[in-house]
Image (spheres, rainbow, N blue to C red):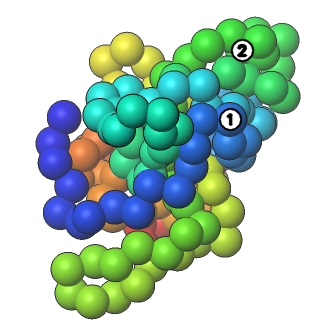
C-alpha cells in the first residue's frame, strides 16, 4: 500500500457507522476493524481517509447484508491539512466496498472523492465522478 502525502487525522473509530456511496447494494456500513493499524495499548483503533477497513453491512440488499466486507474510506467530516496548507473537510463520512484485490465492487461512486484516496487506490479514481 502506498504511503499518503498527508498526515491524516484519524477520526473514525471502530463502531462508527458510515454511508456506502457506491452501487454495490450496501447503504449503511459499520467499521469492525482497521487493517494495518499499529497503535498503543488500550487505544481504540481508528481510521481516516484512504484507510482499508473491515466492515459489516447494516442496511442494503439481501445479497450483501449481514456479511463482512473490505472497504476504503473516501470522505470524513473531520478536517485535515494538505501540505499546501489547505484544510479539507466533507459533509459526511463515506466509504466504498472493495474486493480482496482492492478493486471497487461497484461501478460508480456518488459524490466527491478525496485526492489522497486516488493516490493510494488508482482504480477508485476510474469510477469516481468528482475528485477534490
Out of 31 and 65, give the one closest to the viewer: 31
Q: Quadrant of residue 116?
A: bottom left
Which residue: 68% across, 35% down? Answer: 15
Q: Quadrant of the N terminus?
A: top left
**Image location of residue 88, percent across then percent down:** 44, 78
Which residue: 55% across, 69% down? Answer: 78
Q: Which residue is mark 1?
A: 15
- Left or right: 43 as drawn, with respect to 59: left
Residue extending furthest front?
42
Q: Quadrant of the C terminus?
A: bottom left
Q: Does dot 2 land on a helix, a strand or a loop?
A: loop
Q: Does dot 1 land on a helix, a strand or a loop?
A: loop
Out of 39 and 83, give the one closest to the viewer: 39
Near mark 2 (Cα within 10 A), the count class, few <14, some 14-19 or many ≥20, is: some
**Image location of residue 100, percent across then percent down:** 37, 14
For residue 92, the mark is none
Near mark 1 (Cα within 10 A), the count class, few <14, some 14-19 or many ≥20, is: some
Residue 81 versus residue 21 in the image, above or below: below
Can you tell which of label 1 and label 2 is closer to the viewer? 1
Q: Which residue is mark 2?
A: 64
Verify CB contact (< 8 Å) between mark 1 and mark 2: no
In 3D space, how far apart are the residues under numbered discs 1 and 2 (Cα atoms)?
19 Å
Which residue: 47% across, 66% down? Answer: 130
**Image location of residue 87, percent across then percent down:** 41, 84
Residue 19 versus residue 111 in the image, above or below: above
Q: Quadrant of residue 21?
A: top right
- Left or right: 94 as drawn, with respect to 75: right
- Left or right: 66 as drawn, with respect to 84: right
**Image location of residue 108, percent across then percent down:** 55, 43
Amino acid at each position: 500500500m502506498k504511503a499518503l502525502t498527508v498526515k491524516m487525522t484519524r477520526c473514525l473509530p471502530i463502531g462508527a457507522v458510515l454511508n456506502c456511496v457506491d452501487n454495490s447494494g450496501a447503504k449503511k456500513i459499520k467499521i469492525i476493524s482497521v487493517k494495518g493499524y499499529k497503535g498503543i495499548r488500550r487505544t481504540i483503533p481508528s481510521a481516516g481517509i484512504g484507510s482499508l477497513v473491515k466492515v459489516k453491512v447494516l442496511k442494503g440488499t439481501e445479497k450483501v447484508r449481514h456479511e463482512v466486507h473490505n472497504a476504503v474510506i473516501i470522505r470524513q467530516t473531520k478536517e485535515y491539512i494538505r501540505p499546501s496548507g489547505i484544510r479539507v473537510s466533507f459533509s459526511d463520512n463515506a466509504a466504498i466496498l472493495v474486493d480482496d484485490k482492492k478493486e471497487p465492487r461497484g461501478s460508480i461512486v456518488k459524490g466527491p472523492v478525496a485526492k489522497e484516496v486516488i493516490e493510494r487506490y488508482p482504480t477508485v479514481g476510474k469510477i469516481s465522478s468528482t475528485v477534490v
